[in-house]
Amino acid sequence: MSSNRYICAAVGRRDAYQVPVALVEAGLLEMLVTDMYCTRSLRFLATCLPAKLRRVVRGRYHPDLPQEKVRSLSARTALCCLRGMMQGNLDAAAGRLDVLCGQLAARYAQRCPSHLLLYHSYAWEAFRADYHHKPRKVLFQYHPHGLLEESILRQDAMGTGNTLPRLRSTTEREREVWRYADLVLCASSFTKHSLVSAGMDPKRCRVVPYGVEPPSPEPSLTAWKPGRFLFVGSGVRRKGLHHLLSAWQAATLPPECELLLVCREMEPALRTLAKATRQVRVVNGASATELSDFFASSMAFVMPSLCEGFGHVYAEALNYGCPILGTPNSCVPDLGGEQDGVFCVPAGNIKELRLALERLALMLPNRPDLREAALRKGAKLTWRRFRAGVVECLSDF
């Protein structure tokens, strides 16, 4: 007879450990299986590491996640990473860790016995294993299904005359694992749509939007600069940056308007296009403090993404009272409507994006109420709400 508890599995600090913490709060966590977790001994050993690596190691921790509820593959993780560096193929090393996590989750579920709540990159081996009991198999799908993502990017490349960007690598493990799940949780309606497009019964899927950490101190609603539009993210076409720059070039905007692009990296062709576009400033990455200042001082946040599993940056912008402009291919439709400071245009439609930029440039300086509405909406997007949503889905299941 199985217990009512769940084995959870994920590599890295996935979603800041909010799913296993939700299970802890509900008394439902049997074990978290992960690649590395900062135990007391590892925290002590990390003092010998370089500052940047020390922050990474110490970040693999959550105060509400009991250490006795975590089983990590620290030694195997180190060996996999070392082998990957020697072979010059870290992607292959990451793939091996995904498989190991899934296999270990299966062994613990067989031994306990327990149910399974696994992120989709690590569920294939566990969901397909043999069990003497009948575990519930709950999948958390954090990326859109690979087939829809590939189709969207191919169509965009054909429509713009660009070469197809490097696609996120997907395997049968990721594309087909949903077929073995009894219940699938997604962070956005778009991710659910991508699974339904692949053939999943929509009744088997529930949407639980992510939360974000609230800014501290509470942001000021009067520090923004009229005309400043902000983009934060990878400087790649999947984020719709090429469409944003094209729409900006074609738009008729007041002279005080500025497009601020905060990108740690940017595709060379997009960097060239940005340099050739008027009233555009590129910032090569930003600290947490600088990023907070950018959100607080911008009139609107804009990211016309082609494909997002969620898009935390939209929620982060709302938390600063910064209205957002995005596309349906993300969490944006789940966050609210125009009365909440949430604006949406079809993905890949440069004309509609241009019109939206022109409209917001004229409207937002005269609508301080939309900043207040955005702040109220952002304040509701908490991790506590996300955790409660996960537990509610399990209790209804």
Image (spheres, helix red, strand yellow):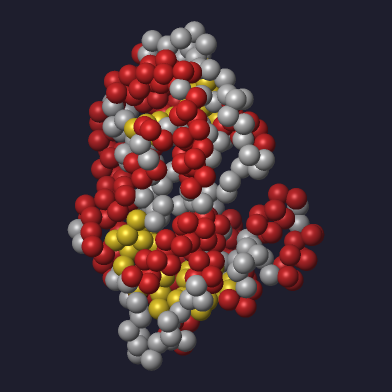
Would residue 367 appear left or right of 175 to someone viewing this image?
Answer: right
Would residue 194 appear left or right of 71 to someone viewing this image?
Answer: left
On screen, residue 70 above or below 19 = below
Q: Position of residue 180 (x, y in %)?
A: 28, 70
Q: Position of residue 375 (x, y in %)?
A: 51, 37
Judging depth in this view, the residue of 219 and 41 nearest the camera is 219
Would residue 37 appear left or right of 393 to someone viewing this image?
Answer: right
In the rendered image, is residue 167 in sight?
no
The residue sitting at 48% across, 18% down in the picture is 365
Asked where in the image residue 285 lies, by quadrant, the reply is top right
The quarter of the image holding the N terminus is bottom left
On screen, residue 263 above or below 26 = above
Asked where in the image residue 243 lies, by quadrant, the reply is top left
Judging depth in this view, the residue of 360 and 197 nearest the camera is 360
The quarter of the image holding the C terminus is bottom left
Counting the numbered discs, the total is: 0
Judging depth in this view, the residue of 227 and 16 nearest the camera is 227
The residue sitting at 37% across, 14% down in the picture is 251
On screen, residue 199 above or below 240 = below
In the rendered image, is residue 223 in sight?
yes
The residue sitting at 69% across, 70% down in the picture is 39
On screen, residue 347 above or below 254 = below
